[in-house]
Image (tube, rainbow, N blue to C red):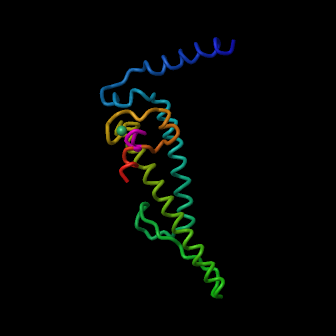
Amino acid sequence: MFHCLIVPLFDNYFTATTMEPFDNEAMKVKYMDKKTIEKIKKDLLARKTQIEEELKNITEDDGAGESEHRTKFPDIGSKPEENAQEIGEYTTNIATEKVLESSLRDINSALKRMEDNTYGVCKYCNEEIGEKRMLARPVASTCVACKSKLQSKN
Ligand SMILES: [Zn+2]
């Protein structure tokens, strides 16, 4: 009963969204509907804002622009155990900063690919990566096949 009811609804949904006209420039992304990409874009922008906030908390503004950050050295105190704590925090912050900056780079290049209409296309084989993978990993720029080939080489 449930099956019979839900399937026609989804058929209509997919037909309606994939039948949208595309101009030639956007042909490359025809397999992912614009609404899905818009949704992913919104998520990426939200994540970007969040990362920038986190980076602001652990770095000093050195005026070098948004891609360069300098990890703050915490000033807890001058006792030996406080110094050790400062160094510990500093080390953690450097590691966190590296992770955040690399996520930020991934997000920015994903957003750039959306602008260029190459989002969801594998950078190695030029085949579509697939909506399922893009939803699971919105910053992916390689398809599963190319990624596993690369990993087996390393
Ligand atoms: Zn590929």
Quadrant containing the C terminus is: bottom left
At 44% from the left and 29% from the top, the residue drawn is 32
Would residue 92 appear left or right of 28 to someone viewing this image? Answer: right
Where is residue 117 shown, x and y percent of the image?
36, 36
Examine the rendered structure and indicate whether residue 39 appears above or below residue 70. above
Q: In which quarter of the image is ligand 1?
A: top left
Residue 79 part of the magenta segment:
no
Quadrant containing the N terminus is: top right
Q: Residue furthest right?
A: 1
Where is residue 49 shown, x and y percent of the image?
53, 52
Q: Residue furthest left?
A: 24
At 50% from the left and 45% from the top, the residue drawn is 44
At 63% from the left and 78% from the top, the residue drawn is 85
Would residue 84 appear left or right of 18 to someone viewing this image? Answer: right
Q: In which quarter of the image is residue 144?
A: top left
Boundaries of the magenta span:
141-148
Where is residue 102 shown, x and y percent of the image?
45, 57
| Front in this rendered view, residue 151 or 41 | 151
Q: In which quarter of the image is residue 25?
A: top left
Where is residue 70 shown, x and y percent of the image?
47, 70
Would residue 18 appear left or right of 51 to someone viewing this image? Answer: left
Residue 145 part of the magenta segment:
yes
